[in-house]
Image (cartoon, rainbow, N blue to C red):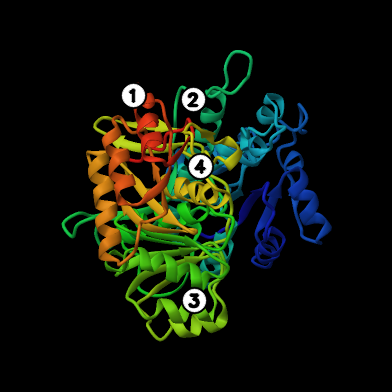
Amino acid sequence: MIIKQALISVSDKTGIVELAKRLNQYGITIISTGGTAELLSKAGISVMEASSYTGFPEMLDGRVKTLHPKIHAGILARINITDHQDALIKASIPNIELVIVNLYPFRQAIAKKDCGLDEAIENIDVGGPTMIRAAAKNFAKVAVITDPQDYSLLCDELDLNRGATSLATRFKWAQKAFTHTASYDSAISNYLTSLDAECQYKDFPDSLNLNFTLVQPLRYGENPHQKAAFFRDETFIPGSLANYMQLQGKELSYNNIADTDAAWECVKTFDNPACVIVKHANPCGVAIADTVARAYQLAFSTDPISAFGGIIAFNRTVDRDAAEAILKQFVEVIIAPEVTQEAQQLFSQKNNIRVLTLPLHQEYHRYDLKRVGGGILVQTPDTQNITISDFRIVTKVKPSAQQLEDLLFAWRVAKFVKSNAIVFCNAGHTVGIGAGQMSRVDSARIASIKAQQAGLSLSGSVVASDAFFPFRDGLDVVVEAGAVAIIQPGGSIRDNEVIAAADEQGVSMVFTDIRHFRH
């Protein structure tokens, strides 16, 4: 389809002046609205304001400007239907073959803390989605572009096809356009149904619409017989894994992505330079230290067997010293906020290692989702972090200052270990981790066995339990292994029995009154 007339109305004006100049060069008549028309005109681009084109002025503070038959008939008329073209000729309405529209920034508006309902409503676009849907429906004749990143492709099409666009490309743009308006409407629905009668936020909306965009197909899922793909949530959250940059290495697998996310979310929780090593969604070694190289060495020492082929996450820049230490072992993925040029040169010697960078941000999606048969479970994410001042010491023996720091460290690690979780720590690094057992006592025993296998002593260590000890047997096991201080939520009907056992054995114990189950 040769493009003779284009309609441009954009909220995001990135690249629009440059594109409009190219359209002028092709002799394409440009119709535009309000701020877009003004911008193009000031840039010396020949443009016809929409109200001049329709012969009807904008009204209602700009709410009505493109909702006019001369615009929508020009977009919707089918090129191969004689009656349609005859109707346009009779009404003196020319065809519109190109629609470039993006919408009022609704998501950006409601993301502001001080955004009220009135401001949100005013950022609901009406004419824009109508034009996009009309153009996408008639993709056989009309090219519709909603993403500034597609401007260069449009220019390539015009160059290749002498002022025309191909049907295949128009169909691709139509798919993208309908996805764009669906996502936009979903955001509006989620926002409005999350408000109660007094326009206050409820915990959950009445209707939850999810929008994800395909990032890449994956070779397979958790197992080779399962198909898989990676999708990105269209609600942009800085620092979330879906926004990583890959510097080198093979394509990420399904399990790589899942495990990297677990490692990244854990390492983000620490203030000091930290390293987290994950295997099969569980931390197998965590440490904080003065340098990332030292943090890696301490984390690796927790469980060298499990760390083989693991995922390594850092919350600081990876330097040469850290890279040299990492390259002594086999690793699948490294993720950090930055990697120095020296470190990257070292990693390039093993080009199969996947090296990712991602800016560090403490922001989270509003909901965690878990698929179940016929539905999804939805909860707010477990972002609760406590400080030492939140501890409730319940035993006669009080923890030392160093033990309090280690208890806090152990508690933050335990939040990311699959339940039932038992985490032994000493001097800012893990020395034994027991995860994912049906019995808390078994997790404690496994943690002790892991420490023995790694040649680490649990004598004088502290231990964290992600949920309360239902009986004293779990406490007896960790104390027998060498723990001298325990952190746990409390809340069991047998708390007094467990506290008495701690006093009997001369160890300290603190309650957090917060549980960290992770299934």
Distance, label 4 to label 3, CA atoms, is 31 Å
Q: Earlier in the sequence, mark 4 or mark 1?
A: 4
Mark 3, Cα crowd under 10 Å, few <14 / some 14-19 / many 20+, is some
- Whether residue 188 is visible to the viewer of this picture, yes or no, is yes
Q: Residue at label 2?
A: 205
Distance, label 2 to label 1, CA atoms, is 38 Å
Q: Residue at label 4?
A: 365
Q: Is residue 447 above or below residue 246?
A: above
Q: Which percent across, then down, holds residue 298?
A: 43, 67
Horizontal side of residue 188 vs 13, given as left or right: left
Q: Earlier in the sequence, mark 2 or mark 3?
A: 2
Q: Mark 4 or 1, which is nearer the eye?
A: 1
Q: Residue at label 3?
A: 322
Distance, label 4 to label 1, CA atoms, is 36 Å
Q: Earlier in the sequence, mark 4 or mark 3?
A: 3
Q: Mark 4 or 2, which is nearer the eye?
A: 4
Mark 2, Cα crowd under 10 Å, few <14 / some 14-19 / many 20+, is some
Inspect the image, locate mark 3, and give the three-letter code of the amino acid beneath it. Answer: Ala
Inspect the image, locate mark 4, and give the three-letter code of the amino acid beneath it. Answer: His
**What label does residue 494 carry, if any?**
1
Q: Are marks 4 and 3 in contact (CB under 8 Å)?
A: no
Horizontal side of residue 413 vs 62, given as left or right: left
Q: Are marks 3 and 1 in contact (CB under 8 Å)?
A: no
Q: Which percent across, then down, holds residue 29?
A: 68, 55
